[in-house]
Image: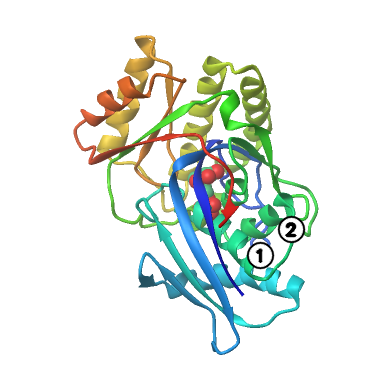
Amino acid sequence: MKAEARARANIALVKYWGKADDGPLNIPAVGSISITLDALWSDTEVQFDGSLAADELTLNGQNRPEQLDRVRRCLDLLRARAGVDHAARVTSRNNFPTGAGLASSASGYAALTTAAARALNLTLSRRELSVVARQGSGSAARSIFGGFVEMRAGTRPDGSDSYAEPLMAAGKWPLELVVAVTAREEKQVSSRAGMTRSAATSPYFPAWVAGSPPDLRQAREAIAKKDFESLADVAERNCLGMHGAALAARPPLLYWNAATIACLEAVRRLRRSAVPVFFTIDAGPQLKAVCAPGSSATVREALADVPGVVDVLESDLGPGAEAG
Ligand code: PMV
């Protein structure tokens, strides 16, 4: 009863920020659209073992008891389907900084769900896997699929229609990603805590939720038509809207540092000089630059020169989660 899986990080171009319920179902308040990346991944092994007293989690060689509730949530859903009650030993490793706004929970929970389902010999559709992964981390539902992916907010109270689905294969529009890493440490306020605080206290939160459906529509159309300008327009606006809602929370949430802003300005300068690139930023200080095919080398060079950038990562678009 042991299996491994690899899942990749994904970056949302239209963001998920806020939950429709505060319970364990983890139903999002808004849909989201993302790209799955090739170069940033989690490798996770799950072993169900009748001799274990409780579930155990090792992440990058360290015990992480504070993550166990969410891990257990995914494991319990799968154990119930398989009729198994053994505890599990989960060993996960990321090939990139953990908890720093690089979507490590997305790749981590997608890999966990895929490995655990395989270890239990369950044959689940990717849609079903995405429903389980969502309950570990909302963005993880999207990492089940490769390329361009949409997460549906859904309307059912049991969360059964809050799943991710593929929009377009990676190879049809091979966008490139450059990540400017501006801090390596784990962020102080997790996405989960940040979005809960935004929903509960930010006067801009209702406007953020209301603005999501038109942004999703524009992004869906831009992707279908491979319209880079339109995707750039909606992705930057949606990202700043999410951060606007977070900035107005009480106490305020400011995920950026000085280098994040300097990178944002560098991306705007590049676009003004006709380099096809746009930025997005998640719940952390890293800036993600999405580049039209063939322009990542120029963008990488420009971002590496920005004071405060400690590392630059590059990635193509990648596949969905794979059991190995
Ligand atoms: O999946 P979580 O709970 O880590 O939340 C992800 C939130 C953002 O990364 C900021 C946006 C998104 O859609 O990925």
Q: Residue furthest top?
A: 273
**Please, is residue 230 above or below residue 259 in the view?**
above
Q: Is residue 197 visible?
A: no
Q: Indicate left or right for 116 with 156 as reference.
A: left
104 left or right of 308?
right
Residue 320's x, y, as percent?
59, 45
Q: Residue at x 70, y 50 (%)?
A: 126
Mark 2 residue's CB less than 8 Å from ligand 1:
no
Residue flagged by tag 2: what amino acid is it?
Answer: Leu
Q: Label 2, on which residue?
A: 124
Instruction: Describe the colour scheme in one phrase.
Output: rainbow
Quadrant hosting residue 55:
bottom right
Q: Residue furthest front?
A: 324
Q: Who's the residue at 34% across and 16% down the image?
A: 270
Q: Secondary structure at mark 1?
A: helix
Picture quadrant where residue 27 is located? bottom right
Q: Of the numbered discs in the image, which one, if any, rests on residue 280? A: none
Seen from the viewer's position, the closer of residues 130 and 93 is 93
288, above or below 10, in the image: above
Q: Which residue is mark 1?
A: 117
Q: CA distance from mark 1 to mark 2?
A: 8 Å
Looking at the rendered image, the quarter that the N terminus falls into is bottom right
Tell whether label 2 touches label 1 (CB within 8 Å). yes
Residue 160 screen position, x and y as percent: 78, 55
Which badge, 1 or 2, comes first in the chain's sequence?
Answer: 1
Residue type, label 1: Ala
Q: Residues within 10 Å of mark 2 (few under 14, many from 20)?
A: few
Q: Residue at x 34, y 41 (%)?
A: 256
Q: Position of residue 266 (x, y in %)?
A: 30, 23
In the image, residue 70 lies at what x, y percent? 56, 67
